[in-house]
Image: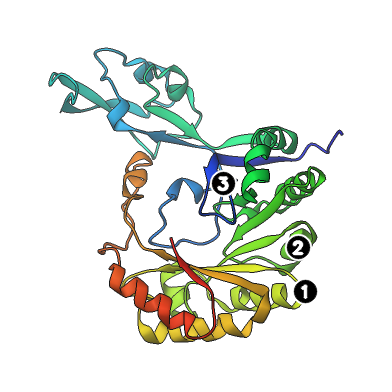
Amino acid sequence: MTRKASTGKVFDIQGFSVHDGPGIRTTVFLKGCNLRCPWCHSPESQRFQTELCWMEMRCVGIEKCGLCLTACPRGAVSKGSIKESAIDGSRMQMIVVDRQRCDDCGACAGVCSAKALYMCGTDYTVDEVVERLLKDVPFYNRSGGGVTVSGGECLCQPDFTLSLLKASKEHAIHTAVDTAGDVDYRHIQAVLPYTDLFLYDLKSMNSALHKRVIGVPNERILENAKKIARDGGRLQVRIPTIPRFNDSKASFAKMGRFVAELGDAVTAVQLLPYHNLGTVKYERLQRSAPIVEAEPPSDELMNARKEQLEALGLSVMIH
């Protein structure tokens, strides 16, 4: 079947995923997000364009390579600090990228022998992604899994997401959409007939706090969750549990009541404890570290919040 020339900007396709919906899944991560959560562990998902990353631990130093220094047409790559090799203890000179000059053309990544410089964000057609999904069908069939379209915010690429979901359904693949819900409802309404499950983020019931910390108010997010439930969609509500933001008993009481009011549309609630494992990704993009600098919530707190929601009749899991 020939499809329209619909392409999407993808930054990762992850097989054997077990936390992004039921069963064993393939998660397709689309680039671009309209929120700026300060605990985001995938900063490479935020911008919509393909962008340069640098993994310092892979760099072999300009003495052994250095091709990037002359490859950049804008002179954005230059000699940097001296580091000691973790392999043999030798000293080697690293590179530094001037992000003000860099236009993410990828010339330096193209010549990097160690793949320390690499581009994040690849244009895929729907058929190319489906071809990848079909390799995992045996795992879906055995486990009740399927494809999860995630991000970033996948509904910020609405046409591609819709086409991918339709194509997946042509092959009887279970589909899930991972969304923060801050999009025009027409985009959700369009994908709803082809989406078996929405993985729906809920971060706070306090709109002023939501706007101050994340950058947008929460009214549209909450209203869209109600509309999905009204229109027959199924939701697995995901609550990132963030210290000093939403981890209090009072905060969970408000979120729990809202989720309970969505009724049978909610299949489960998934609690996602804050972690700081994404900090290294900010370094690869040479951006500032996330604003949230905190210890991950304790098992005791997470179990207490789980029991608090279960007391409202909700099915809750911690991942």
Task: Check the picture and name the quadrant holding the N terminus.
Answer: top right
Say what secondary structure mark 1 lies in: loop
Q: Position of residue 73 (x, y in %)?
A: 45, 22
Q: Position of residue 57 (x, y in %)?
A: 28, 30
Q: Earlier in the sequence, mark 3 or mark 1?
A: 3
Residue 291, image quadrant = bottom left
Depth check: give the residue in front, 85 or 184.
85
Q: Mark 2 or mark 3: name the one nearer the start of the chain.
A: 3
Identify the residue at horizontal 40%, vertical 23% (top origin): 115
Three-letter amino acid code of the residue under disc 2: Leu
Give the Cα distance between marks 3 and 1. Answer: 28 Å
Question: Farthest residue in the top direction?
Answer: 64
Q: Secondary structure at mark 2?
A: helix
Dots 3 and 1: beta carbons under 8 Å?
A: no
In the displayed structure, 316 sits above or below 57; it is below
Compared to residue 105, the image places residue 71 above or below, namely above
Residue holding disc 1: 231
Q: Secondary structure at mark 3?
A: loop
Mark 2 vs mark 3, CA separation in Å: 21 Å
Q: Position of residue 19 (x, y in %)?
A: 51, 54
Residue at 71 percent across and 59 percent down: it is: 196
Along the line of sight, the residue nearer the viewer: 89 or 236: 236
Residue found farthest to the front: 142
Residue 192 numbered tag: 2
Residue 127 in view here: yes
Please rate how many residues cluster around mark 1, counting C-alpha atoms within 10 Å: few if below 14, some from 14 to 19, many from 20.
Answer: few
Which amino acid type is marked by label 3?
Lys
Residue annotated with mark 3: 31
Q: Quadrant of residue 60?
A: top left
> Given contact means CB atoms under 8 Å apart, are the residues at marks 2 and 1 in contact?
yes
Residue at left 76%, top 40%?
Answer: 6
